[in-house]
Image (tube, grey):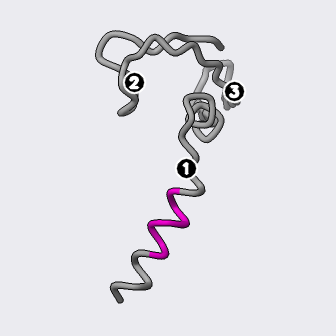
Amino acid sequence: MAATISGDGWLGIAPAGQKITMRSLDFWRCENGLIRENWVLVDLLHVYRQIGVDVLARMREFNKARRVSA
């Protein structure tokens, strides 16, 4: 899926007109011919990487700060 971040932004990402692609998985469970459950997984790490945010580096820095203050 492709999108442009605009308007009020999306999930805390400021609107700057960035074009992004989103990878996702969509699982459906059917029972007696009816959809009973749906699970959707979105690769948010991939989205953040496209806009220049290294989430894993931020987590490492956060954990370093926690160890120092403990």
On the rendered structure, is 64 left or right of 68? right
Residue 25 lies within the magenta run: no
Instruction: Name the residue tied to disc 1.
Output: 55
Span of residues in magenta: 58-64
Q: Looking at the image, which is closer to me, 47 or 52?
A: 52
Across and down, in percent, residue 47 comes to 59, 31
Residue drawn at x 44%, y 84% is 67
On the rendered structure, is 67 left or right of 20? left
Instruction: Name the residue tied to disc 3.
Output: 23
| CA distance separating discs 3 and 1 | 17 Å
Name which of mark 1 and mark 2 comes first in the sequence: 2
Q: Secondary structure at mark 1?
A: helix
Name which of mark 2 and mark 3 comes first in the sequence: 2
Q: Quadrant of the N terminus?
A: top right
Q: Quadrant of the C terminus?
A: bottom left
The rendered magenta stretch, by its main secondary structure, is classed as: helix
Instruction: Name the residue tied to disc 2.
Output: 10
Q: Which residue is farthest left? A: 8
| CA distance separating discs 2 and 3 | 16 Å
The amino acid marked with disc number 3 is: Arg
